[in-house]
């Protein structure tokens, strides 16, 4: 697991549920836009994450041993955007082994399970699993 992810988990665990939700919304505002090179792929429907009820498109690359994550999320889904922004911050630049070693229960570790509906939790857990799987394949573009 990456040191950055450990720091983010500790930060979320140190505050109450209202503050955790505020932090999620703050992360949502910081989600980087989808790079131009992926926009035609998104528009063609590629790399859609079907487990999410919110339209989410996900690309994971390993470049020179460092994981890079690119996503596009519908504007009306700030909690999904916030969670993905956390993953980008935690895993961006990490080694594939660090990402692959991340726990699948990140929502629980971030203490967000009670704040996120079960239907969203299924999609977010699927995203974590996809990112971890892609990190294992160092030649990947998922």
Image (cartoon, grey):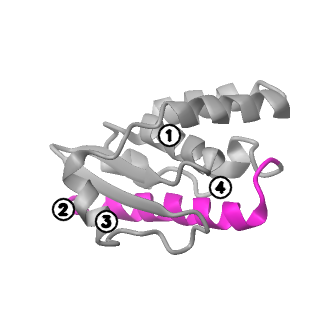
**Is 142 drawn above or below residue 61 in the view shown?**
below
Which residue position is annotated with label 1?
A: 85
Q: Is residue 20 left or right of residue 48?
A: right
Give whichever of 112, 50 is nearer the camera: 50
In the image, the segment drawn in magenta is 115-140
Label annotation for residue 107:
none
Is residue 40 rendered to the left or right of residue 6? left
x, y percent for residue 8: 59, 30
Residue 105, quarter of picture: bottom right
The residue beneath circle 3 is: 43
* Percent position of residue 52, x then y: 57, 67
In the rendered image, which quarter is residue 130 located in? bottom left
Mark 1 surroundings within 10 Å by alpha-carbon count, few (fewer than 14), some (14 through 19), many (20 or more): many
As helix, strand or loop, the secondary structure at mark 3 comes to helix
Residue 142: tell me if it is visible: no
What kind of element bears circle 2? loop
**Is label 3 or label 1 in front?**
3
> What residue is pinned by disc 4?
105
In the depicted structure, whether residue 81 falls above or below residue 93: below
Q: Any mark on residue 139, and which?
A: 2
């Amino acid at each position: 697991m990456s040191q950055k992810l450990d720091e983010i988990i500790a930060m979320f665990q140190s505050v109450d549920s209202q503050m955790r939700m505020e932090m999620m919304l703050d992360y949502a505002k910081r989600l980087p836009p989808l790079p131009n090179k992926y926009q035609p792929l998104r528009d063609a429907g590629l790399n859609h994450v079907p487990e999410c009820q919110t339209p989410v498109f996900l690309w994971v690359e390993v470049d020179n041993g460092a994981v890079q994550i690119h996503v596009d999320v519908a504007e009306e889904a700030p909690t999904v955007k916030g969670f993905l922004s956390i993953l980008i911050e935690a895993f961006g630049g990490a080694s594939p082994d660090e990402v692959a070693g991340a726990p699948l229960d990140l929502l629980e570790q971030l203490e967000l399970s009670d704040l996120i509906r079960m239907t969203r939790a299924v999609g977010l857990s699927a995203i974590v699993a996809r990112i971890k799987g892609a990190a294992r394949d160092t030649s990947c573009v998922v």
